[in-house]
Image (cartoon, helix red, strand yellow):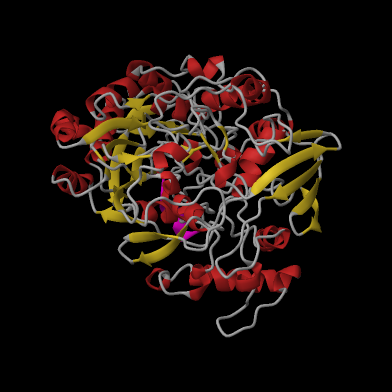
Amino acid sequence: MRTTAPAGGVPRRAERRRRPSTAQLAAALGTGALLLGGLGAGSATAARAAHASRGATVTFAEPPDATPNAIFPIATAGNTAAYNSAIQAELYVPLTFYDATSGKLAFDQRASVAKSIVYSDGDKTVTVTLEKLKWSDGTPVTSRDVQFFFNLVKANKDKWANYVAGQFPDNVATFTIVNPSTFRLRLTTSVNPLWFSGNELSLVTPLPQQAWDVESASGKVGNYDLTTSGAKAVFDYLNGQDNHLATFGTNKLWKVTDGPFTLGSWTTGGAVTLEKSSTYDGPDAAHLSSVQLLPFTSADAEFNVLRSGGLDYGYVPTSDLSQSKFLESKGYTIKPWNGWAINYSPYNFNNPVLGSTLKQLYVRQALQMAIDQPAISKAVWQGEAAPVYGPVPQSPPSPYLSATQKANPYPFNPSKAKRLLESHGWKIGTNGLMTCKSAGTGASQCGAGVKAGTVLDLHMLSESGSTQTTNQMEVMQSELASIGVGFQASYAPLNTVLSETAQCKPTQASCSWQMSFFGTQGSWYFSPSPNGDPLFASTGSANFGSYDSPVADKLAVAATTSSNPAALRAWSAYLAVQLPAMWLPLPAYQVSAIKDNLKGVSQDPLAGQTIQRWYLANG
């Protein structure tokens, strides 16, 4: 048996409270600690907090044309943006929370409900003890509240955006309440403790069963979640309420919280006000009286307000970085917020027009070789974007990155890309675009399912609101044209792009999309273990393009059961070569502009925001 902090691999005695040392974290990760430099101020210490201005309000800029749209902490399709979970974590404390506020990727116990996790029986049994917290209605947070979440996702996993077949909750054979503050999970197989605690249990949020276990607005609270039919009815009701943004600020459901903030208001336009909770009794109370999250239709609109000093925490579009000195003279600190993330554009392998074409590896290889990532980073993102060559974050260094991915299997080479297409039966037609002239499955033919006369003319659905993203699409259009591939982009708000980039069958009307881009601030931010199986496993809930590879599936499973980083390196190497998506430069989450007197800010690479630790310094 081993006793761990909820990182699942940071050894410490359960009864002691201390931050794990670098050596301990290195042991947990197997080959070395994941060091994350340049993260900002870190969490506020008690001494600094003593100098905080009480009763203060801070304004924070939301991403351009990307407004929060969900408060219910069980994400469904189209509601997976990072700012949704960031707000939810302030209202409803997650079971386990990970960040790098200490300078290293680690479990953040103050921001979690879990107090300790014990792995036993060859890592097949997990026993979790909870912190003493209470809901705003005065009732304690208990194991029953965790079971309530578990029952809802188990009965409605087809609707849960974080579901991957075979993983949570499928890998939980039994859920047992030991006592009000302890529960035990018996798993179907041994697991990698870091992955299970950091990637699986971090998806769990205890929910107020005593207030939310209802099937309708007029129904009485019961134990409906204990049956499958009841859990479906409860989920449908709560999820239905989550679709009414206009009522978020007044709905009594969302008033029952256990986090450091409560919800003051939430408009349909995306403006959100968080207010300090008067009932929170945990170790991570908010310092500010309120925080206003403000929406903007474009980065330019936000920057105009920032220049006027109207924001405490905003961002600088990369096209305006030349004005950093001006902002610094107005009392701002400018610094990039870099993510533990990747950027990519999924291909829709089930698209009825080009799905069969995109399934051909040589086609994806040609498209990737036509994209000059370093040039895009320099010209479009002013150097504030890093090339991406595969499914694992490339920075900061970690034991999970394979040599294959790091070396870039497909460097920019448009001449080679064009020859590759031509060697497989494609020729540039009178329209100037590559056209399949030799249909068939031979070595020099277009490939299975590709019909003669098929034209390589791609359409990208991209998020709007960013001049840099629009410029990137225009550069990509020019680069792909150089190899005879057509490329056009259309634009929509981020939430629209996410909802329309749906898993689909070729016969469905929703399958008309071919490629999509939602990576103005990075496409995917990872949990501590950068296993991307939700993205590229055949059953992955975020496998938007329906990529299907038995080899990739097998490698994904290995990474969830083995603590050896070599398992993830194998995943990294395979998918870097197989190209389940088009890899694209990863911009900083944002180049932040933070008022000099706003302290306690940590720009977490996992895109989390411990807003409760922010404070305004006196003087």
* 390 part of magenta stretch: no
The residue sitting at 64% across, 82% down in the picture is 220
Of residues 231 and 143, the one drawn nearer to the viewer in this rendering: 143
| Residue sitting farthest toward the right | 121
Image coordinates for residue 424, horizontal then vertical, percent: 46, 24
In the rendered view, does 76 fall on the left or right side of 44? right
- Vertical placement of 505 versus 207: above or below? above
The total of numbered circles placed on residues is 0
Q: Per the image, is 512 magenta?
A: yes
Residue drawn at 47 percent across, 44 percent down:
348
In percent of the image, x 56 and y 44: which residue is there?
110
Left or right: residue 434 versus residue 364 is left
Query: Which range is magenta?
Result: 508-515
Residue found farthest to the bottom:
218
Q: Quadrant of residue 559?
A: top right
Q: Is residue 452 visible?
A: no
Frontmost residue, 316 versus 462: 316
Q: Which residue is at the front of the view, 84 or 555?
A: 84
